Amino acid sequence: MTSVKQAVIAERQLIDYLRIYLEHETQRLDDIKRFFSRVTSLHSGIYNEQSATIANPIVAFKLVKRLKSEWMNVVHSNEAEENINALREGYRRMEGSLPKLEDLQGAAQGLMRLQDVYDLRVEGLVRGHFQRITNGNAVDIYKPLVPDTLSGDDCFLVGKVAYDLEDYYHSVQWFEEAVRLFRGTDWSPENEGTLEDALDHLAFSHFKTGNISYALSLSQELLLHDPMNSRVHFNVEKYEKLLDESPAVTNQSLVLKRPDSTYLRTRNVYEKLCQTKGSQLRRSVVASGVNQTTAEYRISKSAWLKDSAYGVVGKVDRRITMVTGLNVQLPYAEYLQVVNYGIGGHYEPHFDHATSDSSPLYRLKTGNRVATFMIYLSSVEAGGFTAFIYANFSVPVVENGALFWWNLHRNGQGNVDTLHAGCPVIVGDKWVTGMLKLYAITLEKKC
């Protein structure tokens, strides 16, 4: 969310560049309009007079001058190019602070994650409503103070992200909305997609989910807009042949199936816990042997804080020691970590304890108990709860609140009740610190 706030500042600078461009372009077009009016008035005035008037040497000179000089200056003017180049240069200077493709794709996936975990209706999200169906009725789980809507192009981009991942469960739903919103509207130059693009992608998405009859219907509609598209003609023939060979497909009740996930076994419980409470810096990495790597099951940004670098960290460490009675200094604990969760930011179900070989230098002796201490640095408006899957409860994000738990039993075995997850943030700026692995007794040095 810090990056989102920085993006707002960056766009304000771009707006200034665009304002300057528009001012210069307006002045340029006003000059051209004046030339147009002057020339037009001559043809509706003096050039409609007797030939003797046109034969006036001054009139003749000005006509020749205009055709040879003034028209050439207007037609071959570089002013328009200079204006657009100035705008592009301003954009180029800002480009380093603008979102990257990964950010755009991540924001789209964040919307889809909210859609899944909180069972939100795509139709509602398009209108700026966070709703799910309960007992046949659309129920708001969150009402933003300033609602915003999604355009056809917005929906097309979300669908395209899913489509590129071969996630046709989501692409069908978002392309459906894109097609609905594109119909009857004019294309805008800032749009990436068009009605034809949305129809094309939606048709293939339905084909991949087995709905061949609808894929055929959409492809035929696409040909009305693009009758010379040979690829679509080929698809129409293929769909018609498939329907002739298997006509029963048209009568099947096709249900879209959500993609599998790494936490499929606990997904229903996890999402139920998130939904129960849902109404009320650098990309984070996860352990990967000795190294660390980004992962799609954890979406946030984080930083490690050392006592030597920030004096306040030492104060926090001492308070944690006072509360827990544990040594929070290396090698008995990790450095303090600060995490910020952004658009749909979450952490899928996971344990904080791992195998005895997860540390490159130290091995846990039998009887060691790894603990986690987590502090909420902010509250959020909706979502973001910490859900304990097998223990079957969730904890709200309350500023200055803290969580503490043992990850291992006294015999050194992992406590399965500590399986937990960070529910996606619906609205708000979630900041968390801690996430420490606290070791209760001494460690054994590896050979």
Image: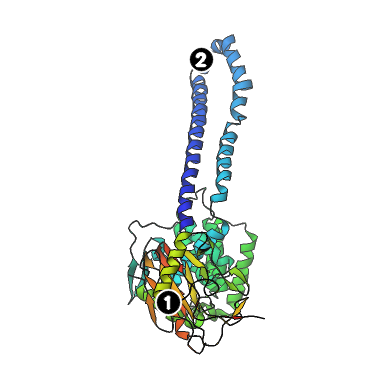
Horizontally, residue 342 falls left or right of residue 82, namely left
267 is higher (above) or lower (below) than 195: below
Cα gap from disc 1 to disc 2, whole angstroms: 104 Å
User: Which callout, 1 or 2, points to the residue nearer the camera?
Assistant: 1
Front-most of residues 111 and 162: 111
Task: Tell me where residue 219 appears, x and y as whole percent.
Answer: 56, 64
Residue, disc 2: 49
Residue at 54% of width from left, 79% of height from top? Answer: 249
Q: State the residue lying farthest toward the bottom.
A: 411
- Is any part of residue 182 visible from this angle? no
Query: Looking at the image, do the residues carrying marks 1 and 2 touch, with CB atoms under 8 Å apart?
Result: no
Residue at 33% of width from left, 75% of height from top? Answer: 136
Task: Tell me where residue 340 appears, x and y as whole percent.
Answer: 47, 63
Q: Amino acid at mark 1?
A: Gly
Front-most of residues 49 and 268: 268
Q: In terms of sequence position, does the residue under pointer 1 or pointer 2 come before the other?
A: 2
Q: State the residue lying farthest toward the right.
A: 447
Picture quadrant where residue 127 is located: bottom left
Q: Amino acid at mark 2?
A: Glu
403 is higher (above) or lower (below) than 369: above
Q: Please identify the quadrant where the N terminus is shown.
A: bottom left
Residue, disc 1: 325
Horizontally, residue 233 falls left or right of residue 278, namely right
410 is higher (above) or lower (below) than 193: below
